[in-house]
Every structure is written in structure tokens, then in C-alpha cells.
Image (cartoon, grey):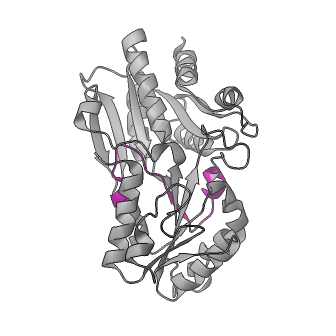
Amino acid sequence: MPTILESINSALHTALENDPCVYVLGEDILDPYGGAFKVTRGLSTRFPERVLTTPISEAAILGICNGMALRGLRPVAEVMFGDFVTLMADQLINHAAKFRWMYNDQVRVPLVLRLPMGGRRGYGPTHSQSLEKHLLGAPGLKAVAPNTLGNPSDLLLAAIADDDPVLFVEHKLLYTRHLLTPEDLLDWKVESGGRPFPFHILRNAENLPARLTIATYGYNFELAREAARELMYEYEIFSEIVLFSQLSPFELDPLFDSLRRTGRLLTLEEGTQTLGWGAEVAARSAEQLPGAVRIRRLGALDLPIANAKSLEDDILPSTGKIIQTALALLEN
């Protein structure tokens, strides 16, 4: 099976080949370097006129993409590190997200902003964050995140085909991960739905009653699977995992269905826990099922991410922390 990196790279090749309106922009994305994480390798060789290297100015990159999108093109911008999306905030929130509404639906802004996010590589406080939570509440923006269960190529092609701006949140540790095969999922029965940005519900293969729902996205699914497997084999506690590709707008009906079965929710994300994705998911779950669900949230500690591995591990979620939080949630 291909890796996440290979799948995303393949989607970019396909998009450029099939649609002359697609352009790819970013810093140091030309061959032979191919970008900081090598996702754009081979693109500039095949499509030299539509793969454009840019100055080191994230605000300028998105400003150019806004203009291109307004003129009918479909730009895909790579941010070298997702942390730098803060430099794009004005162009993104006050322009790309709003033009459709400001001009009475007479214009659309079909751009994709690829955001390599996440820690665990020792890059320190300004290159290891998961900042997507700061953008999920902006009307007019969509946010999606690939994972190893879905097909990142299909997800990116759907984002490029979308007529509204889409944030494509790629966790850096996923790049070298292979897509899951049926052999990787022998413990699970998988149900999927929600095109074009699908969700997946994982239930134990024996259909035994689950006591816990874990809601998550992106790389955190890897941790959730490990924790759920240990809970199953070591504690005889069965879980359901609801894995989202679309982070915003919030479409949570599959989660509510799971919670009606389990009555307990654990949200898992790598961004800081306060005011995060999980907080909104928890609030909507409590509103939808008042008095019927117990909730715990797990995210990064509210601290800058350290360079030292031991400190970084303490700050970020882990399999052990998931198990500890799940057991506390299941007490009584």
C-alpha cells in the first residue's frame, strides 16, 4: 500500500494533469528538493509552468492564491510548516472565507491550503504545533484531515474540486505511514460514509457491546487504535472509534449514533486542549444527548511544545494517556 506522502503526491500529479486551472505554489517546492517534506517531488519537472516557487512570505502566497481563485483558477498552496498559517490569517479569514458572501455569491474562491501540522519530531515550539482549532470557527472555510484508513488522494482531489477554500491538515508523522490494509484491521468492523470527506466508524469485529466512543482525526487515529486494542485485550473494555476527515463544518450525526450505544465520549486531538476541536464536539454532544453521555477530553497540555523529546512526550497525548483517561471515564 502507498504511504500518505505518496498518495498526496499522486493526487497533485492527477489534478495538474487533468485540470489546466490547477496550480501549485509554495516555498522550495521545485525539483529536486520537492518541498520540506518532499510532497511536491516530480511536479515541477512535469508541469514547470504551473508549479511556482514563491518568496518567503506566507501572506503573499495566500494573497496570490485569492486572486488566482477569483479569476477562475484552482491554486493549491503548500505552507512549509503549518505553524506559519498565522501569517496568512488576514488573507484567509477576512478575504478567502468571505468573498463569496461579500459579493452576493457572484464569485467563488476554490483554493486549497495544505498545512503540515503536528509534533513528535523535535522541531520545537514554533514548528510543532497543531493550530487548526484556531480556524475551525471561521465561516466560509472548510477543514479536512487525511488519515491512514481513508484515501488521502481522493480527499485532496475532492478538496481541489470544491468551490470554497479548504484547509488540508496533514500531520507530519503520517507522511511515512502506509494506508491500512484489511489485515491491519482484523479486530475491527469498519463502516464509512459522508462523501466527499468521509467519516469512519470502527466497531469490534465480534459486535460485542462497546462502553466507550473515541472521537478523533488525522494521526491521532493511530494512537486511538493502539489504546482501544489495549483496552480490549488487557481490560476487556470494548470501544468504538469515530474517525473524522471533515473537521469543519461540524457534521456529528455518526458520533451521536455511536454515543447512543456507548454513553461515554473521549475526544482526542493533538492541539492544546483548551477551547479545542474536542471542546466543541463535547459541547454539541452534550446538547444533542442531554444527561445521556459522560465526556472527557484529551489534547496537548496548554504549553508551548518543547524540543526535548521527554518534555514533548509529556506535553502531547499518548496511548498511555488515552488509556488512563478512558479508565477514569469508565469508573462507576
Q: Nearer the viewer, residue 246 or 227?
A: 227
Residue 134 horizontal/vertical position (percent): 67, 54
Q: Is residue 269 above or below residue 25?
A: above
* Start-end of magenta stretch: 132-155
Q: Is residue 58 above or below residue 101?
A: above
Q: Nearer the viewer, residue 175 or 48?
A: 48
Residue 74 horizontal/vertical position (percent): 46, 78
Report if residue 72 lies within the magenta region. no
- Where, quadrant-wise, is the N terminus in this rendering? top left
Report if residue 154 lies within the magenta region. yes
Would residue 215 appear left or right of 257 to someone viewing this image? right
Determine the residue located farthest toward the right in the rendered image: 303
Residue 142 horizontal/vertical position (percent): 52, 62
Q: Nearer the viewer, residue 158 or 194?
A: 158
Residue at image coords 42%, 21%: 211
Residue 191 horizontal/vertical position (percent): 28, 41
Q: How many marks?
A: 0
Is residue 150 visible in the rendered image? The answer is yes
User: Where, by quadrant of the figure, is residue 192 drawn?
Assistant: top left
Q: Is residue 221 above or below residue 7?
A: above
- Where, quadrant-wise, is the C terminus in this rendering? top right
Would residue 213 appear left or right of 193 to someone viewing this image? right
Residue at image coords 39%, 21%: 229
Q: Is residue 273 above or below residue 130?
A: above
Residue at image coords 23%, 36%: 182
Is residue 196 visible in the rendered image? The answer is no
